């Protein structure tokens, strides 16, 4: 048996929708299937406005431009994240200020945020790692105290709920979601920017349409459109939107399947945590998760490496390391950071492993049992 | 009968390819169908390296970042172009310097370029309007004399050949192509960046992958990738690439169909040009065209408006205006331009019309005859 790390889930209706979109002769952005997805997302998750874009990265970029960042402005984000969170900040000409994470969720450590705030700080940009919501309430309190905007990189967390019961992406000024092949709900490459801040919505339509006021022409308010602002082509082909819609329709089915993986991992790994060998995710109790991923923090990086290697070679099961912290990457160093600047992040990232996680694994009891058996076997061999 | 301005062409194999891509479980960028398209483009058009990206706009942005533009740098481009050509320059922090066009092709007037060159100029960024190649040989001569890079916005001109017989996009440092729904060869939303400058290729792979050296891991040169540079998600879903491949296979068929439209328009409109009422495109004789579009420059903007209105209301045939010049748009004015700064562009843009142009029109003799009949009828009514 071979267990991959990730595999996209194929929905039954997707092929029908793909052909419908293709035969519609309307293949570019914001046509029928885009509008269906947007409507679905707004109704189900209570987002104020939704823009479908080519990727989660594009959603981050559109968002930081919408924040009106200028050269010299500072953005606080965790070092433990994907490069796109930081490249978006750099593209806007602003400076990324990296913050520590905390080990229960691997999300930004809100206790460390206040000391990073300067007169140049304009934005806090946390992420929801592994689908676990960051502490948005605390972050918004800090932001309000310092007149900062909040933009959550929720690439991994669509359909998770925060400790107040709200869906992620509903309370911050902006939220970015990803529909990349590796995500719970996917169309290969795709993303969404949620804009909750009313005053930014009109400009978002302009940024999406290459800096033009084309939306006003489509709405019948003008006869011809013109160039009025910066922008890009922040649009998702209707062909991809049709595949995405089939996934959104399946959110409950997909989430239930994935929940089984979380439950299996938690149950089977708890004895190793109780014995002090590993540490498991500990999301706030009131949160509900979309079951995007599952991470394990080992007691040493040697044991982590041994685990990954043995799991692959002896059982053909693929687990992966986490992010290389951005502050200590080549680009982070060129920005003036040293690895020791964020010792907690540096240490945790060296010991973290992500276990195999994909919808089909939750639907196939044999594969899930084999995966758990393999993981337990390797842990037993290491910690015997 | 109703004649739209544009309609994407559906290829016979596309549905088969779309389902194959979907069933492959590999939906993100640079998988099988991406590689097939890239291979096809490189072999057929002799491009040095090709990157499939989410849009022509994204290709422009990736290209300007690759040029290493810095704040204060200047980029010379025509004012008569789509907003994306200029927004890409602004995103890179550089200043767009707008140049006049000439009426035979509506492309950049190369006689006007030298006087715009300053010590800050880094790049010349012409476009190939309506699929007609710009005077790339003259532009490259000027660039060489002043140590400038050349990046051609060839969004509309894939498969056209320049006066030396070379395909567009082969001689400049960079070229951007679009596969938007409105283009000859389309997948709804998509684009390609061609990189001919050898020294820029390695960095292009990094910019495409969100600023990481992931390509080195895929090539087996490193065990884990890290953040090393700026970048974005300049990738095209393999689902869209499968549809694109079906179009690339049909380039000759599509081009032959579209040639019939050009020929019909030229033949039927020549008497009106000979009488001095209108002006038709006059591409350099040695060029060969991809037949992307067809424009007519009227003798007055009043006659232009009358033509558009009558053609639509009396015959249900949709023609369109051209670009609003960028220098005199709201954003251009905010950059310090005045409409009179580029009087030739301002005048020509006020009198130009684009006629209906799409592959199916060239395949349906009745529709093409009706379109030409309608156009001639309206011209006769105006210039009786």
Image (cartoon, coloured by chain):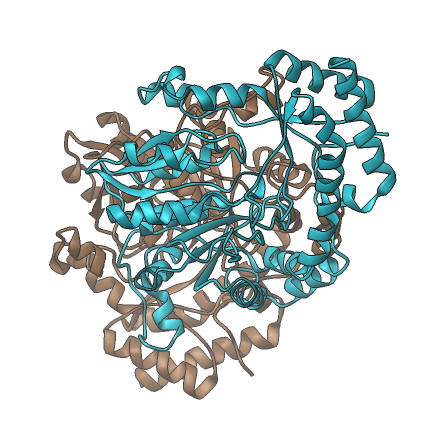
Chain colours: A brown, B cyan
Q: Residue at x 86, y 30 (%)?
A: B1
Q: In which quarter of the image is the N terminus of chain A?
A: bottom right
Q: A258 above or below B146?
A: below
Q: Which residue is drawn at 53% across and 80% down?
A: A2
The correct choice, above or below, for B9 with respect to B206 in the image is above
Q: Is residue A245 above or below residue A371?
A: above
Can you give x and y, in whole percent of width and height, for residue A299 in the image? 25, 72
Above or below B153: residue B218: below
**What residue is shown at x 55% (from left), y 73% (from top)?**
A368
Hey, which quadrant is residue B16 in on the image? bottom right
Residue A351 quadrant:
bottom left
Quadrant holding the C terminus of chain A? bottom left
Residue A287, visible in the rendered structure: no
Residue B199 in sight here: yes
Q: Where is residue A38 in the image (x, y as percent from the top left)?
A: 59, 36
- Horizontal side of A202 relative to A365 (left or right) equals left
Residue B127, x across and y down, in percent: 47, 41
- Depth check: give the residue in front, B55 or B214: B55
In the picture as drawn, the residue positioned furthest to the front comes out as: B274
């Amino acid at each position: 048996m071979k267990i991959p790390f990730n595999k996209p889930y194929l929905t039954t209706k997707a092929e029908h929708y793909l052909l419908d979109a293709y035969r519609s002769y309307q293949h570019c952005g914001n046509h029928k299937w885009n509008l269906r997805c947007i409507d679905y997302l707004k109704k189900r998750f209570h987002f104020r406005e939704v823009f479908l874009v080519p990727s989660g990265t594009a959603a981050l970029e559109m968002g930081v431009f919408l924040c009106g960042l200028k050269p010299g402005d500072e953005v606080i984000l965790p070092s433990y994240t994907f490069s796109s969170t930081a490249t978006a900040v750099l593209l806007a000409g602003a400076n990324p200020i990296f913050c520590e994470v905390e080990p229960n969720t691997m999300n930004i450590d809100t206790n460390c945020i206040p000391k990073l705030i300067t007169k140049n700080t304009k934005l806090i940009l946390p992420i929801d790692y592994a689908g676990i919501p960051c502490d948005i309430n605390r972050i918004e309190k800090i932001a309000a105290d310092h007149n900062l905007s909040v933009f959550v990189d929720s690439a991994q967390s669509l359909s998770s709920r925060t400790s107040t019961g709200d869906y992620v992406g509903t309370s911050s000024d902006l939220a970015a979601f990803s529909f990349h092949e590796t995500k719970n709900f996917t169309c290969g490459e795709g993303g969404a920017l949620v804009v909750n801040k009313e005053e930014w919505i009109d400009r978002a339509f302009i940024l999406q349409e290459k800096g033009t006021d084309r939306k006003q022409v489509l709405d019948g308010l003008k006869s011809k459109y013109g160039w009025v602002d910066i922008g890009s082509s922040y649009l998702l082909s209707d062909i991809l939107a049709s595949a995405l819609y089939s996934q959104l329709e399946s959110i409950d089915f997909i989430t239930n399947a994935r929940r089984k993986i979380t439950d299996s991992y938690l149950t089977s790994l708890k004895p190793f945590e109780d014995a002090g060998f590993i540490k498991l995710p500990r999301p706030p109790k009131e949160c509900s998760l979309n079951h995007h991923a599952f991470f394990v923090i080992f007691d040493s990086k040697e044991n982590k490496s041994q685990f990954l290697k043995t799991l692959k070679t002896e059982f053909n099961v693929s687990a992966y390391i986490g992010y290389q912290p951005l502050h200590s990457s080549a680009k982070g160093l060129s920005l003036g950071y040293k690895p020791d600047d964020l010792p907690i992040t540096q240490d945790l990232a060296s010991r973290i492993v992500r276990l195999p996680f994909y919808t089909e694994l939750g639907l196939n009891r044999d594969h899930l049992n084999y995966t758990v058996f393999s993981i337990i076997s390797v842990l037993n061999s290491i910690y015997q």
